[in-house]
């Protein structure tokens, strides 16, 4: 994507960015009260406040830090001082079109910082921009925004599906209202409970305190830089923490396909990043090779995926709370941390199997929608440079 080279086509006009926008500084937000307007930083939304700096569609340009994180906002917002906002001349430029155009550019050669990457007004204002007329820009923007809308809707559906599955998990395995032999909620219908000293809580009769190793196997990834693909073989994308967040991209590294099956990742596999960023996810970006610092989590003792996924998700929360209480960042999770974990496990895993029957269709739908999201993003990103350079004609 960053190899985009703007081209001047016959129906385009050449501008400097200074012709198209006025760049404005963000401001400190600490004195603001909580409210409904997003405060945007270089990493996205930081909080919501009671006032806004600007209320028209705007392209947000990084001042410091990561220079490739250009953003767009079409609602009232506040920005912090590491992020510029823009007042766009809408007679010449469609704000969304301009956002997508700028997001294709490699800005690293304009960096004026000696340490932390940074950009000045002049760095941005000097950018040369080639634009078609405003009508054509608007048509192109509508095509791209239609794809964005589909992506957003799918993501919202997935968030709702995950929340629904988590609610069922809490009902069954936190509140212990799984279905008893009569098909009724166990605890709410007088199911017998016993105090467990290790867990420091009551758990159902026929349950015990175990650890995460009892229900799951944690396989660490490879140092993939040692397993580069040969010229004559089809490589696999390397799955790092970035890919867990953003999926596979043109910047994703490659690894030989001749790696152990245990570190190959397929759609629907559970991944757990254990270093710096503590996250659990269902992978849905296609076949890949697992890098170190991420565990592939599979079943131990035939416990189903839904059970070990949510148990791990809950326990990662415990690790984060421990770190917060110590006012430190949990650098990484070790095998000892997993060994020392304490969770409630049913002696009879039929309960977990019945839960799996409820949840597995939800998991399949989540993976399917994420696959659709990936395809839509791929389609959009392939269209972008062609549309911006006039290689695809819009009537």
Image (cartoon, rainbow, N blue to C red):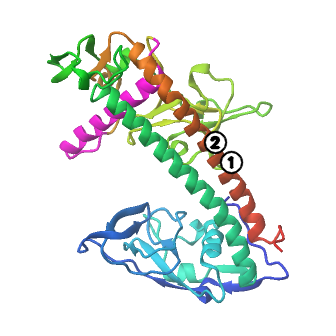
Q: Position of residue 194 (x, y in %)?
A: 17, 16
Q: Residues within 10 Å of mark 2 (few under 14, many from 20)?
A: some
> Taken as a whole, is the magenta stretch helix, strand or loop?
helix
Query: Quick check: is 306 in the magenta stretch?
Result: yes
Magenta stretch in the rendered image: 302-330
Query: Quick check: is 117 in the magenta stretch?
Result: no
Task: Say above or below: 341 vs 387.
Answer: above
Task: Say above or below: 134 vs 265.
Answer: below
Q: Which residue is mark 1?
A: 375
Residue at 60% from the left image edge and 72% from the top image edge: 99
Q: Position of residue 16 (x, y in %)?
A: 64, 85
Residue at 33% from the left image edge and 31% from the top image edge: 171
Quarter holding the C terminus? bottom right
Disc 1 on helix, strand or loop? helix
Residue contact between numbered discs 2 and 1, judged by CB atoms under 8 Å: yes
Give the image quarter of residue 201. top left
Residue at 72% from the left image edge and 54% from the top image edge: 379
């Amino acid at each position: 994507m960053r190899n985009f080279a703007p081209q001047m086509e016959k129906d385009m006009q050449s501008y400097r960015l200074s012709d198209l926008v006025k760049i404005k500084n963000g401001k400190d937000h600490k004195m603001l009260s909580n409210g409904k307007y997003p405060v945007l930083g270089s990493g996205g939304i930081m909080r919501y406040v009671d006032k806004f700096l600007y209320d028209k569609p705007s392209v947000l340009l990084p001042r410091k830090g990561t220079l490739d994180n250009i953003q767009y906002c079409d609602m009232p917002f506040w920005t912090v001082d590491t992020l510029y906002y823009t007042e766009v001349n809408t007679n010449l430029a469609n704000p969304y079109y301009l956002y997508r155009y700028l997001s294709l550019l490699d800005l690293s050669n304009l960096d004026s910082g000696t340490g932390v990457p940074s950009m000045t007004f002049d760095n941005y204002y000097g950018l040369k921009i080639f634009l078609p007329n405003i009508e054509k820009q608007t048509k192109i923007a509508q095509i791209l925004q239609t794809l964005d809308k589909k992506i957003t809707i799918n993501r919202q559906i997935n968030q709702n599906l995950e929340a629904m599955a988590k609610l069922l998990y809490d009902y069954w395995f936190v509140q212990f209202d799984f279905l008893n032999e009569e098909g009724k909620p166990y605890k709410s219908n007088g199911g017998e409970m016993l105090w467990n000293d290790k867990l420091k809580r009551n758990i159902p009769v026929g349950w015990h305190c175990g650890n995460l190793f009892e229900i799951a196997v944690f396989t660490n990834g490879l140092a993939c830089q040692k397993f580069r693909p040969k010229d004559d073989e089809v490589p696999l994308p390397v799955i790092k923490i970035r890919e867990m967040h953003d999926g596979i991209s043109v910047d994703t590294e490659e690894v030989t396909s001749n790696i152990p099956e245990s570190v190959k990742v397929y759609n629907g596999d559970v991944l757990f990043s254990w270093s710096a960023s503590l996250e659990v996810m269902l992978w849905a970006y296609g076949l890949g090779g697992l890098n170190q610092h991420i565990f592939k989590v599979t079943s131990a003792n035939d416990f189903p995926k839904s059970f070990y996924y949510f148990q791990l998700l809950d326990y990662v929360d415990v690790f984060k709370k421990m770190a917060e209480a110590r006012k430190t960042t949990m650098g990484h999770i070790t095998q000892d941390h997993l060994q020392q974990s304490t969770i409630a496990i049913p002696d009879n895993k039929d309960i977990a199997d019945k839960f799996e029957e409820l949840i597995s269709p939800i998991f399949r739908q989540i993976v399917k929608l994420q696959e659709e999201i990936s395809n839509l993003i791929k389609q959009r990103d392939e269209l972008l440079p062609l549309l911006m350079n006039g290689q695809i004609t819009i009537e």
